[in-house]
Image (cartoon, grey):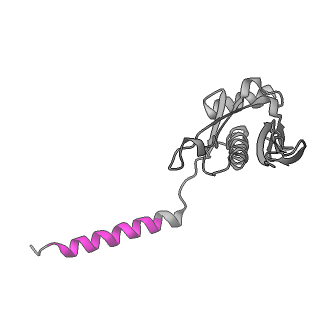
Amino acid sequence: MVHFWLPIIDHHVVLLVVVGTGWASLSKKPKVGPMRGVRVEPGPGVPEGLVIPAADLTERFARSSGPGGQSVNTTDSKVQLNLDIEQCSVLSEKQKLRAIKNLGTTVLTVEASTQRSQLQNRNEARKRLASLLRDALAPPPPPRRKTKPTRGSVRRRLDAKRRRSEIKKLRRPPL
């Protein structure tokens, strides 16, 4: 009687097949749950928050840098997440223009390779993308109003200059 495990990968689920004496059993173990869109928390410029659908995102996977393993033991854990702002379905035209102006590009790209797991890197990339997008959608701060220095601050500045001048005068050799 020979038993062995044969992993069959099927879209986010690993099926382990035990083959023995004329029978086979399937054991489903979810490897990675379905990834949804990106949630952008409420903030300036995004009062209600946003949910970027997964259809607007492009993910790529690559091998992370750093030490580790022979070629059979390596995984594509580095994640590159792209959002084309011009094609984004949930942003208004005003938000798109503001984001492109603040970011300086039409495609927002985030890479995450800090974790060893691809799933953790995917979540990290989504958090970073949401943070960058929230900051890019924020309106510019109001312009600074020019103010005059207060009388007290002018007096303190001149007193400090006077004291410093006296200290330097005392260093001079007598004439």
Residue 121 placed where, x, y %?
Answer: 68, 47
Query: Quick check: can you spot residue 122?
Result: yes
The single residue placed furthest to the top in the displayed view is 87
Residue 161 placed where, x, y %?
Answer: 36, 66
The single residue placed furthest to the left in the displayed view is 175
Q: Nearer the viewer, residue 120 or 3?
A: 3
- Residue located 73% across and 24% down the image: 86
Q: Nearer the viewer, residue 91 or 36?
A: 36
Residue 2 placed where, x, y %?
Answer: 78, 48
Q: Nearer the viewer, residue 157 or 12?
A: 12
Does 109 lie within the magenta span? no
Magenta span: predominant SS is: helix
Location of residue 175 with respect to 144 vertically, above or below:
below
Q: Split into 4 quadrants, where in the image is the C terminus? A: bottom left
- Residue located 63% across and 52% down the image: 115
Query: Quick check: can you spot residue 45?
Result: no
**Numbered range of the magenta stretch:** 155-172
Does 164 lie within the magenta span? yes
* Number of numbered discs: 0
94 relative position to 158: left or right: right
Residue 156 placed where, x, y %?
Answer: 46, 68
Q: Name the quadrant containing residue 72.
A: top right
The single residue placed furthest to the front in the displayed view is 1
